[in-house]
């Protein structure tokens, strides 16, 4: 009997995928089997990183990271007895920029029905505006001069026709069409490094997504979507923050973990834009288990001056908080396992969104403008 199940059938190939979480201290790999909207973790691999392999959440030593990823990948495949060909990769680091952009489009004929061509025009406008903003942010923060930003991930988070929220505006009539898109950008060199790792592992890149975005989408329940929430992933080198407000992921920020509470306060002040912040704060990541950190966060001294309507409530996320994903290995038990599970959840949702009309228009736009 063969040791591994190589996925030769097309249906099996697309039913299985690998999750790759390249952390500063630890590489984490999951092998997942998709069953409709749900997924089951079949294998888990973890491998410590070399001390100088990463810098600010970005790859600094390609050869070292590839070797480490390969060992973690082999461990997960051994456990799952399955070798998937596709991989979902999390993108993190100080230079990753994630933010929402909204564009309002007054229609000339309010009685005519919205067509997909109108959506394409709007999406091209919002994507180009977002790209300019991302490049400006990168150049300002690092003083590198001209720095090429590349779109990593894009998702439509809100569509309204005359103020009325709809999932698909095509076919509606109305005067004003408004679309909000969440975009994640990274420097080209950062993305090239990720693609090199995937290629050297002999995998097909199914998706790349900002880790805080995937985390927030995976763990937000109906109450969080309604009331808002702040998701904080404390890693070994960087800390990722995602803000959910007004029913969507509004923004993400990443910063050096050495100045954690100061960085969290600064990130939330920037994300808030002077508006009220949700009071639910959800922690994960290996660094979040430090008792000193939890104690200082609960004191709420760090939150002085931030626009919280009342004192924030802090709790750790656990694997059960990740929706639509079960674990048959018994290995996923800690807040440090939430990030790769969030990436798996993203892959499961992406499969469902592939069939959505609005997202089909989005993919065509991104292909046309070559962001």
Image (spheres, rainbow, N blue to C red):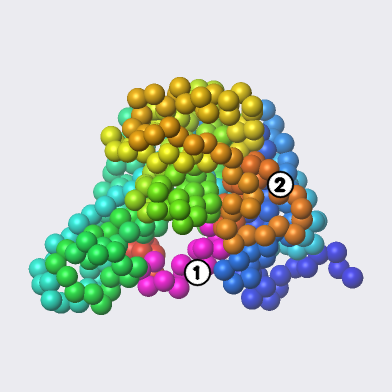
Q: Residue 321 location, x and y as percent?
A: 59, 52
| Magenta region, residue range | 346-359
Q: Residue at x 25, y 65 (%)?
A: 164
Residue 19 lies left or right of residue 155; in this view the side is: right
Q: Residue 130 location, x and y as percent?
A: 30, 47
Disc 2 or disc 1, which is closer to the eye? 2
Query: Which of the numbered marks, if any, corresponds to residue 352?
Result: 1
Q: Quadrant of residue 236?
A: top right
Image quadrant holding the N terminus, namely bottom right
In the rendered structure, which disc, 2 or 1, sits on the residue that comes first in sequence?
A: 2
Dominant secondary-structure state across the stretch colored magenta: helix
Q: Residue at x 55, y 43 (%)?
A: 193
> In this orientation, which residue lies closer to the viewer: 210 or 260?
260
Q: Secondary structure at mark 2?
A: loop
Graded by Cα atoms within 10 Å as few (under 14), some (14 to 19) or many (20 or more), the crowding at tag 1 reads: few
> In this orientation, which residue lies closer to the viewer: 366 or 78?
78
Q: Residue at x 33, y 55 (%)?
A: 181
Residue 268 drawn above or below residue 8: above
Q: Quadrant of residue 35?
A: bottom right
Residue 281 visible? The answer is yes
Q: Which residue is mark 2?
A: 333
> In this orientation, which residue lies closer to the viewer: 110 or 151?
110
Residue 119 drawn above or below residue 340: below
């Amino acid at each position: 009997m063969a040791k591994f199940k190589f996925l030769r059938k097309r249906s099996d190939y697309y039913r299985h995928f690998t999750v790759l979480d390249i952390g500063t201290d630890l590489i984490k790999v999951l092998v997942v089997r998709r069953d409709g909207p749900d997924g089951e973790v079949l294998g888990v691999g973890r491998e410590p990183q070399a001390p100088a392999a990463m810098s600010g959440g970005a790859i600094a030593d390609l050869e070292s990271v590839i070797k480490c990823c390969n060992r973690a990948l082999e461990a997960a495949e051994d456990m799952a007895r399955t070798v998937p060909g596709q991989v979902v990769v999390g993108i993190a680091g100080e230079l990753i920029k994630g933010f929402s952009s909204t564009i309002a489009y007054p229609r000339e004929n309010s009685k005519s029905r919205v067509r997909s061509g109108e959506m394409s025009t709007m999406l091209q406008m919002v994507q180009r505006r977002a790209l300019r903003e991302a490049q400006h942010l990168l150049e300002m923060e690092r003083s590198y001069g001209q720095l090429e930003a590349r779109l990593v991930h894009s998702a439509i988070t809100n569509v309204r026709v005359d103020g009325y929220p709809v999932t698909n505006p095509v076919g509606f009539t109305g005067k004003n069409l408004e679309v909000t898109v969440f975009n994640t950008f990274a420097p080209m060199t950062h993305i090239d490094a990720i693609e090199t790792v995937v290629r050297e592992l002999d995998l097909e890149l199914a998706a790349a997504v900002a880790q805080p975005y995937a985390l927030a989408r995976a763990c937000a329940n109906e109450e969080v979507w309604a009331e808002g929430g702040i998701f904080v992933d404390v890693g070994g080198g960087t800390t990722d923050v995602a803000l959910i407000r007004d029913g969507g992921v509004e923004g993400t920020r990443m910063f050096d973990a050495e100045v954690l509470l100061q960085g969290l306060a600064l990130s939330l002040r920037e994300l808030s834009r002077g508006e009220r912040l949700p009071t639910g704060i959800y922690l994960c990541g290996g660094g979040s288990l430090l008792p000193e950190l939890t104690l200082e966060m609960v004191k709420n001294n760090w939150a002085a001056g931030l626009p919280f309507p009342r004192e924030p409530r802090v709790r750790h996320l656990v694997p059960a908080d990740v929706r639509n994903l079960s674990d048959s290995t018994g290995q996923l038990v800690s807040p440090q396992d939430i990030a790769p599970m969030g990436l798996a959840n993203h892959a499961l949702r992406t499969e469902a969104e592939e069939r959505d009309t609005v997202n089909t228009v989005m993919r065509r736009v991104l292909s046309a403008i070559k962001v």
